Image (tube, rainbow, N blue to C red):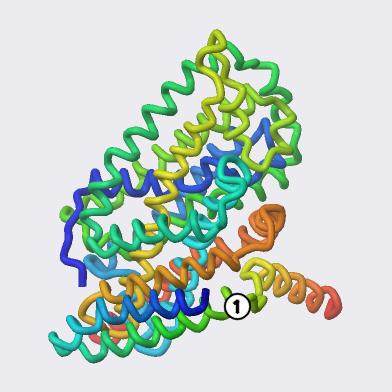
Amino acid sequence: MIIFVVLVFIFVFIYEAPELVEKEYWRELAVFTLLLLLGLVLSSLLVSGVKLPYIETVWIELGEGIHRVIQTSL
Amino acid sequence: MDQGKISPWQLTLLVMSFTIGNWIVLPAGTEAWQNLWLIMILALGEGLVFAYLSLLLFRRFPGKTLFEIFALVFGSVGGKFLSLLFLWFFLQTGAAALMIFVTLLKTTIFTATPDMALLVPWMLIVIYGCRRGIEVIARSNEPLIIATIVLLFISVLLVLNILDPANLLPLFNLPLSDALWISVGIAVFPFGQNVLFLMILPRVNRRQKVTGAVLKGMIGAGGYLLLIQFLTVGVVGKVGEIYVFPSYEFYRMIDIARVLTRLELIPLLNFMTMGFIKIMLCLYALAVGTAQVFNLRTYRPLVFPLGALLLIAAFRFAPSISQHLRFVEEVNPYFGLFYSVFLPLLTLGVALVRGWLRRRVTS
């Protein structure tokens, strides 16, 4: 599965990058590559079964933490 | 950047679709149940006030997106920081809609289908649409919102034989403070999420009509959601409070002479079309916003990687739908107030004070 994910991201890079190089959009190429790498790392972690935190759980725990701090300080 | 232009009418329809979005199947404030459609009138009023305040920002800086306004008001560093906060808002809003989409399909029709098989083709279409620009999004939205409205009017006729007015009672049996709090929750979700349109307004060809177009879209969507909620309560009754997707259950109960039955495809279709537009607009705002943060000349190459990030965020959004409902009830009002009211008002306030100071210095 990881190989499939890597292949998809390589395909996208091959599809997008030449046009950006041709137009000399270096800044765009850098941001695109950075975001693609971030996506690749996160998707690889996801398909290899690494338990990434849930977004809403983080918010709920953060809210509860702030609530606790306010309660103890009062 | 995107050079496409849309008309005020297309903007109105986009605002309607975006607001209807995922609320159509997963309403907030269901604890108010039979009072919910009444509370929605109050929430719509609050939402219109919030939207008007945000639109004052656009009037003061015509032709500028929210991120450009941030840069002008707070300077480069402060502006970029606030822009990053809003990028997270766009990502979270899109991921939530995507998560609800997959949860609804997995719990109703495609119970044995892997999440990937549902999400990946969906995201590919969203990415394709987003790359084509706002004009294409607006044009593809037109038939979809019209179909959604027509289906609602057909639904009204279909439920006439099973709608029990007694189900709508008792009214006003909720403490005022609870009703107000629920109305704030609805004012920020779905109405407050329209703050995203501050990224799209510069693409409207007649800027003087923007305020009216946005407010009309919100009123249209509010009326639509109010009617759906009214019908759901009237048909399903008190038991509807315990359903996760009440409007889906209400369509299941339709029975016309045992011929027209099991019409739950209608809310699914409505959500798939409106949710599709909502996710596409979130991805568009995310891509255009990211391009503006990094001062890029085009947003198009960013659409795929950001679409992949949106997909990952949807996968890791909430462990269960019950936790999502808890989030909507307990956290979302604060979260929404911060993004939909506090940040636009803060920006407007700082812009007004800076303008006043500049005038005093020059005079």
Q: Amino acid at mark 1?
A: Ser
Residue B267 in the image: state x and y as whole percent. 50, 35
Q: Which residue is mark 1?
A: A48
Of residues B73 and B93, the one drawn nearer to the viewer in this rendering: B93
Chain identifier of the residue bearing label 1 in the image: A
The quadrant the N terminus of chain B occupies is: bottom left
Residue A57 in the image: state x and y as whole percent. 69, 68
Of residues B341 and A52, the one drawn nearer to the viewer in this rendering: A52
Which quadrant of the view contains residue A26? bottom left
Residue B41 in the image: state x and y as whole percent. 53, 37
Identify the residue at image location x=41%, y=53%: B278
Residue B154 in the image: state x and y as whole percent. 42, 21
In this rendering, position of residue A72 left or right of residue A45: right
Identify the residue at image location x=55%, y=44%: B43
Identify the residue at image location x=41%, y=60%: B123
* Placement of B58 over or under B328, stated as above or below: below
- Secondary structure of the residue carrying tag 1 is loop
In this rendering, position of residue B241 left or right of residue A32: right
Q: Is residue B166 visible?
A: yes
Q: Is residue B345 visible?
A: no
Which quadrant of the view contains residue A9? bottom left
The quadrant the C terminus of chain B occupies is: bottom left
In this rendering, position of residue B70 left or right of residue B85: left
Q: Residue furthest left?
A: A23
In this rendering, position of residue B355 left or right of residue B22: left
* Placement of A21 over or under B288, stated as above or below: below
Identify the residue at image location x=36%, y=61%: B124
Q: How many marks?
A: 1
* Placement of B66 over or under B17, stated as above or below: below
Neighbour tally class for label 1: few under 14, some 14-19, many 20 plus, Cα within 10 Å: few
